[in-house]
Amino acid sequence: MTLMQAPRMAATAPQDEQPAARLSVARLKRVLWWLAAAGLLGIAIMLGWGSNDDGPPRDAAQSVGAAASSGSLLDRLTHSRSAPAVPAWSLSIDGAATTPAAPLQTGALRGSAEARLIAIYQSLRSGERAQALLDAQTLTNDYPNFQLAQLLYADLLAVSTSTPVDVGSLAPKNSAQAKQLAVLLRESQLRLQALTEVPKPGTLPSNFLALPPSTRNVIAVDASRSRLYWFKNTAPAGKPANMVLVKDVYMSVGKNGVGKFVEGDGRTPLGVYFITSILADEQLPDLYGRGALPLNYPNALDILRKKTGDGIWLHGTPTAQYVRAPLASEGCVVLSNPDITRLLEDADIRSTPVLIAQSLTWVDASRASAPLTAAVSHNDVASSAMPAGFHTSFAQWQHHRQTQNLAALRDAYSDKFFRRGKALSYWWPTIKKEATPQSRQTDITVVSWQDEEQVVVVNYAEQLKPNQASVNKRQYWRLEGNTWRIFYEGNA
C-alpha cells in the first residue's frame, strides 16, 4: 500500500455507469501499485519510444502484458535507448497551433482540459517530469471526473516515489479493470493520434462541395479518430464562404461502432445530417450533459434503405464524467460538456450540416466556395469537386422548371421518389405547379455521400414568384445507372 490507489480506481471506474461519490483524502493515500506501470508504458508505446518504429503498433492488451516485465518505465519514456530526435509535432487544439519550440499559450490551456492533457504528454516527451506531475495534479483538481487525466496522474505519482515497485501487483485484479484500462489507453492513443494527423489549414472534408456565403457552420465527425471538427465561416457578409476550423475535439460514438441500421443496435449512423433544434440542459436528464443538438436521423436516404430508430443527437456528458469512452453511447455523438456548451452558444448552429463518416478525406476548402446558382449553362462547368455529371443534371432540372418542360422535368425524378410516405404520383401535381418561369433557387449548399452508391444532398432557398417569401428546401439525388435523379424533395 502506497500512494496511488484512489486515482487509479477513479480512472478505471466504469465510465458508462454512474460513479460513486468522490473519494476522501484519507482514501487517496491508501494505495496499491497495480496498473501503475501499464499506463505509462502505453503512453510510451503511443509516443513511439522503446519500440520498433517500422513495426505495427501494439494494442492495449499487449501494452498491459508488457508492463509486468518492465523496470523503470518513466526512464523508458524520457530516456529512450536510442535517444531519437523529438519529432516536429504540429498541434491544433481548440484553434491554437504550435510546435515544440512554441508551447501552447497558458490561456488556451486554462480553457481546454484536452490541451492541458497534451501539454503533460509534451513535458514527458521532453523529460520535464516535475512539470508533468504538477500539471497533472492541477488538471485532476480542476477536472476530478476526467478519468484519463486521473490515470496519468496516478502513473506519475507512482514513478515519482523512490519506493521499489512490486511488479507482481501491477496487473489488473479482474477482467472489468483490465477492460477499463484498455479503454483508457485507447482514448489516450486516439488523442495522441490527433496530434500527428491535424488537418492542414485551409482544408475541408471533401464531401462539402458547395457552401454559399450564407453558410455559418459545418461539422464533420471522423469516427475512426474519435474527432469532431467544427468550421465557421469567417468571411464578411456576402463574400464567398471562408470556412475555418475553430474546434477539433475528442468525441465518442456508439458502443457497437458506426453504421446504424436498426433501432437499438448501439451504433452511430453514417451520412449527411442536419441539426434540427437546440435542447438546453434544463430540458434533459443528466445523462445528456449540458444540452443536445438533435439530428434528422433517419434522413431520406436512411428511410429509402429502411433503416429504423431515431433520437440521434450531439450531446454532452453526465456531470460525474468529463468524457465517455471512445465507444460508449447508444448511437449518439457525445462531447465533453465544455465542448457541447460552445456549440450550444452559437446562435447560428441550428440547421448546420453534420457529416458523420468512418474517415474523412481533406481537400482545399476554396473549391467549396464557388457558388452553384441557377445561372449556369447545360454544360458541366462546375468545379472538379462535383461528381461527374451532377452539375449538368441540376442545371437541367432548373431549366426544365423555368421553361415548364414537364416531360423532361419528370425524367429528373426517380421512380422511387417519396415524401411523407407518398410516391411521386401523389406529389407530381405539386411539382408541376411549382414549375414556373419565375422560380429561383439561391443559397445552394451541396454535400455528397458515397458508400455503395453515390448520393448528393442539396439545400436551397426557393422563391416561386417575385416578391414572394422564399422557402428552405432539400433534395436528395442519387446516381441511377448513368443518370442523376431526385428521390426526395421537401421542405428543409
Image (cartoon, helix red, strand yellow):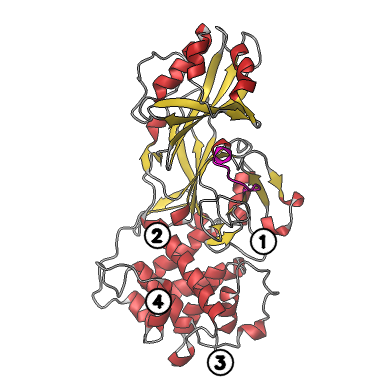
- Of callouts 2 and 1, the N-terminal one: 2
Which residue shows up at 35% across the image and 20% down it? 380
* Position of residue 127 measured from the top left corner of the image (x, y, whole percent): 36, 73
Tell me if mark 3 has few (under 14), some (14-19) or many (20+) residues whose alpha carbon lies within 10 angstroms of its own: few
Which stretch appears magenta? 302-313
Q: Which badge, 3 or 4, is on the more N-terminal residue?
A: 3
Q: CA distance from mark 1 to mark 3?
A: 32 Å
SS of the residue under disc 2: helix
Q: Of tags 2 and 3, which is closer to the observer?
A: 2
Q: Which mark is residue 63?
A: 4
What is the spatial separation of the Cα atoms under label 3 and label 4, in whole angstroms? 24 Å
Q: Nearer the viewer, mark 1 or mark 3?
A: 1
Where residue 264 appears, as percent x and y from the top left, is: 63, 56
- The amino acid marked with disc number 1 is Pro
The residue that label 3 is drawn on is 1
Name which of mark 4 and mark 1 comes first in the sequence.
Answer: 4
